[in-house]
Image (spheres, rainbow, N blue to C red):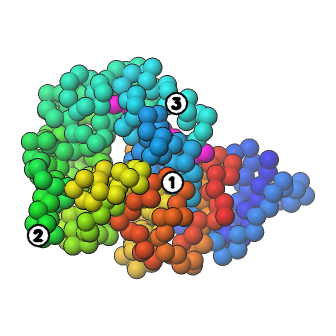
Amino acid sequence: MRTLLKGATVHLKNAAEIQDVVIENGRIVPLKENDFDLGFDQVRRLDGFHVFPGFVDVHVHLREPGFFYKETIKTGTLAAARGGFTSVCAMPNLNPAPDTLESLKTQLDIIKRDAVTDVYPYGCLTMGQKGEGSLSRMAEMAPFVKGFSDDGRGVQTAELMEKAMEEAKRLGKVVVAHCEDNAELKPGGAVHEGEYAKANGLIGINSKSEYAQVKRDIELVKKIGCKYHVCHVSTKESVALIRQAKKEGVDITCETAPHYLILTDEDLKDEGRFKMNPPIRTKADRSALIEGLLDGTIDMIATDHAPHSAEEKAKGLRHSAFGIVGIESCFQLMFTHFVKTGKMAMEKLMELMVYNPAERFDIKVGNIASLTVWDLQAEETIKPETFLSMGKATPLEGKKVYGRCILTMCRGETAYEI
C-alpha cells in the first residue's frame, strides 16, 4: 500500500515546511524522482492543512477489562485518534488489576483485538493496586509494560515505595506516581481549599496531600537512582520541588493536564464534570504550572482521560466519581490557549505532546507512519455529545477552540478521518 499526502505543512521536530509525505508499508519513506511513475494506491490532497507526528498521551484510563460500561479499549482508542493521539499509556485501574502477568494478559488480548492506536499498559506497583500491602509481580510483567503505577492511589509508606523503586530500577522501568498522602486528606469534599471550596464546605484534597509525597519520593529517588515520573502535577509546591530536583540531577519527569492550565477553583460549579483528582486549584497554582511548562520543569502534557457513566457523574461535586474526559480536546485547548496566543511556539507544544513523552517512555516516533492531520483555521465549540468516548464529562464544555482533526493514521492505517 503506497499513499501520498500532498501539499500539507509538515511539522518536523524543529521546523515546519510544505512538503509531500509518502507512506509505504506503514512507514514514512523519502519521496523519489520516479515515485509518480510508479503510482500510488491513494493520494490525499491536504493543501492548507497541517501534518503532525501522532501525539503521545502517557496517562489514559481505558477501563477495560472490568469497567466496559465506562469505556472500552475500542471506544477509548477511537477517541484518542480523533484527538490526534496514536500512542497512549493505559493506567491499571482495572478488574482484574494488572498485578501479575496472568491478569495483564487479559488486557493485552483486548488491546490486540480492538485497539485502533498503539496502547502501552502500565503494571500495578502493588498487589490489587491498593497503594499498600505487597509489591506486584513486577519482574514477570516488565517486558510488556512501560512502567509501574498505582494511579488513583498514592503508595502510602516510604518503605514500600523504596522497595518498588529498587525493583523498578533493576528492571529498567519508570515508577509512575500518583502522589497523594492519605494522612493529609480531609473529609467532607473533593476540591482544593480555595474560596469556592470554603464557601461551600467542600475542602477535601488539599495541596499538601500531593506535594508531601512528591517531596518524600524525590528523596528516595536521590537514594536509589531509579526513573521517576509524577502524574498530573497540580500544585505550585510540587512544581518548585521538581524544579529543584532537576537542578540537582535527579532522574525525574512530570506531566500536567490542560484543565489545570486553563481553569482555577473560581471556575468550579457544583457539577460532576468539575470533579477530578487532583482537583482544579488556585490562580497561584495555575500560574506556577504555566511557568513550569514554559521553563521545562513540566515535561509533558497528559490528559488523565478518565471516563465514567452519566449516572456516576450526575451527583455533584460531593458524590460524583472522580475523573473527566479530555483526550479529544487536548490539542485544541493547548493550541488555542498557548500557541495561538503567542505564549508558546508550536515546536514547544510538539515537545510536550510528542517528543518528551516518547523519549521518557521509549515510544518510537519519526519515520513510523503514525501521524495526524489538522485544519488549524477551523473554529469549534467543545460539545461532549460529539465525543467518540463513552465518557462525556468535561469542565471545558462550551469552550471555543481552534483546530479540527481531519485524519489520524497509526502505522499507516487510518484510525480516524472526517
Taking the spot 51% from the left edge, 54% from the top edge, the residue there is 389
For this orientation, the residue located farthest to the right is 37
Q: Which mark is residue 71?
A: none
Which image quadrant is residue 102 in?
top left
Please tell me which residue lies in front, 285 or 174: 285
Left or right of 384 in this view: 369: right
Image check: 237 left or right of 25? left
Residue 282 higher or lower than 218, as above or below: below
First in sequence, mark 2 or 3: give its number: 3
* Residue stretch in magenta: 116-125
Q: Measured from the top left, where is residue 114 in percent x and y?
A: 60, 39
Label 2, label 1: how many angstroms apart (C-alpha)?
34 Å
> Label 2: which residue?
199
Where, by quadrant of the figure, is residue 179 drawn?
top left
The quadrant of the picture occupied by the C terminus is bottom right
Tell me which amino acid carries mark 2: Ala
Numbered tag placed on residue 389 in the rendering: 1
Disc 3 marks which residue? 108
Cα distance in 3D space between marks 2 and 3: 46 Å
Residue drawn at point x = 35 percent, y = 51 percent? 312
